[in-house]
Image: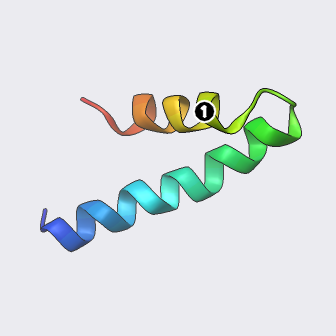
Amino acid sequence: MHLLGQAAVFLLTAVLIVPVFQRLKLGAVLGYHAAGMQIGP
């Protein structure tokens, strides 16, 4: 996958997951961590 495609996947995942975690009052950092876990190998 090209660099631009990877960046788009990272941003899209963060945009989808972080607001869910903020709505659950868990914080953005945990949302980014969960997004990284979803993307990672």
Few, some or many residues within 10 Å of mark 1 (<14, 14–19, 20+): few
Quadrant in which residue 40 is drawn: top left
Spot the residue most to the bottom: 4
Q: State the residue position of label 1.
A: 29
Q: Is residue 15 above or below residue 30?
A: below
What type is the residue that disc 1 sits on?
Answer: Val
Quadrant in which residue 16 is drawn: bottom right
Residue positioned 25% across, 60% down in the render: 6
Residue positioned 74% across, 32% down in the render: 27
Residue positioned 39% across, 55% down in the render: 10
| Image color mode | rainbow
Q: Looking at the figure, which quarter contains the N terminus?
A: bottom left
- Quick one: SS at disc 1? helix
Q: Position of residue 20 (x, y in %)?
A: 76, 43
Q: Is residue 38 left or right of 22 when viewed as pictured?
A: left
Q: Position of residue 3 (x, y in %)?
A: 16, 66
Residue positioned 86% across, 32% down in the render: 24
Q: Is residue 26 above or below residue 4?
A: above
Q: Give whichever of 1, 19 is nearer the camera.
A: 19
Q: Position of residue 41 (x, y in %)?
A: 24, 29
Q: Is residue 39 left or right of 19 when viewed as pictured?
A: left
